[in-house]
Image (cartoon, helix red, strand yellow):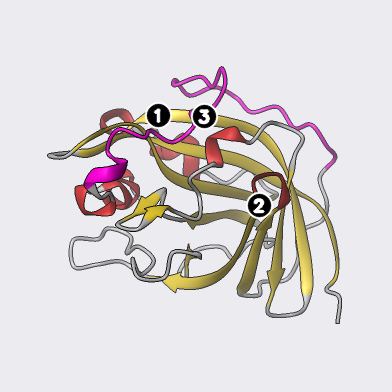
Amino acid sequence: MVGATAVAVLCGGWLVNDGLSSAEPPPPAGAPSAPSRTVSLAPDSPALAPSEPRRLRIPSISVDAAFTDLGLDAKGALDTPPADRPNLVGWYRDGTPPGADGTAVVVGHVDDRSGPGVLYRLGLLRPGLTIAVTREDRQVATFTIDSVRSYPKAAFPSEEVYSTTGRAELRVITCGGRYDKKNGYESNTVVYAHLTSSSAAAT
């Protein structure tokens, strides 16, 4: 399990330039801030064998990004994707790869010094939309979104977010809420999704 501290690192003050500090990312519409049970909107698909992710596509918010693998820093917090590569997302390499049995964790910057980041529009996603992950084994794992939520950093529900449920699930996480130069963003936007289909990648 990746702890709440790992996610909070993604929201440090260095991620935003002064020009963006007043431009808050879109919040999830009607998203609860307290933990609650997700409701699956599409049938589960059998989990795939583990294979590293290579590309994340979220057509509804125009995301088409490469993956980098992330480890933990000296404090046990999850590293973040390089700030000089804006169209990049990261996954926790010692955790579950997307599509395999368990809960896979994907993170990306909401913005950087040059402007909006790869997951700036994450809060616009809605239940029923899909996320596709192309994997090293040339399988495309397609996930259907169950819910989109916003949590204060100070009360991030690690168990709710990272727990496993006996199927292949995905969490996509970025920063959200108001921005403070001293403390960074006040919250995290979390997308909950589960595997609903898989297919061979186009050649």
Residue 149: image x %, image y %?
52, 29
Compared with 139, 116 (above or below) is above
**Amino acid under label 2?**
Ser
Residue 60 colored in magenta in the image: no
Q: Which residue is labeled 3 in the image?
A: 149
67 in relation to 120, above or below:
below
Kindly indicate whether the residue at mark 1 contacts the one at mark 3 (C-beta within 8 angstroms).
yes
Return the residue at label 1. Answer: 151
- The answer to whether 66 appears left or right of 150 in the picture is right
Q: Residue 62 has which mark?
A: 2
- Kind of element beneath mark 3: strand
| Left or right position of 128 against 189 | right
Identity of the amino acid at label 1?
Tyr
Count of numbered circles on the image: 3
Q: Secondary structure at mark 1?
A: strand
Residue appearing at x 76%, y 61% in the figure: 141
Q: Please name the amino acid that badge 3 sits on.
A: Arg
Considering the image in quadrants, where does the C terminus appear?
bottom right
Circle 2 residues within 10 Å: few <14, some 14–19, many ≥20: few
Q: Are marks 2 and 3 in contact (CB under 8 Å)?
A: no
* Left-right relation of 136 to 76: right
Q: Nearer the viewer, residue 84 or 94?
A: 84
Residue extent of the magenta highlight: 18-43
Main SS of the magenta segment? loop
Alpha carbon of mark 2 to alpha carbon of mark 3: how far? Answer: 20 Å
Q: Earlier in the sequence, mark 1 or mark 2?
A: 2
Examine the image and state in which quarter residue 175 appears: top left
> Which of the 4 image quarters holds residue 129?
top right
